[in-house]
Amino acid sequence: MIWLIFAALLICVEVLTQMMATLCLAIGCLAASVTLWAGGDLLWQIVVLATVSLLAYIALMPLFVRRHDKCITHADRTGMDALLGRRAIVTHQIKPGEQGRARIDGDNWLVVAPGCDSLIKAGDEVVVTGYDSIILTVEIPK
């Protein structure tokens, strides 16, 4: 019964903190309780707890990493990083090697296009690729 209580507590901790290790330990506790019911002594229960917890961690880690990577979206970025990849409309032309201006969501930004050898006219669309302080680096979308 103690192994089941530990497993329940660890699952509660996992739900509250989203720590994968506690879920793996809970799985190990369930395996240790099965060992107890099969007649194993305390040493075997601890060995099974450790082994099954480690195997659960190795098996579940790729699944958790894959799920975590899918959950990260553009909306998760904040500050200047939220502008990366966004499209902007040029409001003042951008000459090669000079600065221009572009609008994103109503905000007017100072922009440069270092990789562009031609004039980018007002009204053209550009993509934000980086920033330096408050000056955005843009390029013409492909």
Image (cartoon, rainbow, N blue to C red):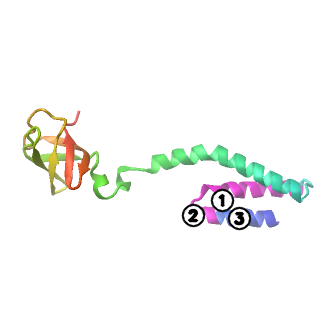
Q: Specify the quadrant that holds the N terminus.
A: bottom right
Q: Is residue 118 left or right of residue 24?
A: left
* Circle 2 residues within 10 Å: few <14, some 14–19, many ≥20: few
Q: Is residue 78 left or right of residue 140?
A: right
Q: Which picture quadrant has residue 129?
A: top left
Q: Which picture quadrant has residue 118?
A: top left
Report the residue at 66% width, 44% height from top: 59
Q: Which residue was labeled with disc 2?
A: 17
Nearest to the eye among marks 1 and 3: give it.
1
- Which of pointers 1 and 3 lies earlier in the amino acid sequence? 3
* Circle 3 residues within 10 Å: few <14, some 14–19, many ≥20: some
Report the residue at 64% width, 66% height from top: 12
Task: Tell me the kind of residue under disc 2.
Answer: Thr
Q: Which residue was labeled with disc 1?
A: 22
Q: CA distance from mark 3 to mark 2?
A: 14 Å
Q: Which residue was labeled with disc 3?
A: 8
Report the residue at 28% width, 45% height from top: 85
Report the residue at 16% width, 57% height from top: 106
Q: Position of residue 108 (x, y in %)?
A: 14, 55
Q: Are marks 2 and 1 in contact (CB under 8 Å)?
A: yes
Residue 31 among those drawn in magenta:
yes
Q: Specify the quadrant that holds the C terminus.
A: top left
Q: Position of residue 113 (x, y in %)?
A: 17, 41
Q: Are marks 3 and 2 in contact (CB under 8 Å)?
A: no
Q: Position of residue 2 (x, y in %)?
A: 81, 67
Magenta region, residue range? 13-37
Placement of 69 over or under 7, stated as above or below: above
Task: Tell me the kind of residue under disc 1.
Answer: Thr
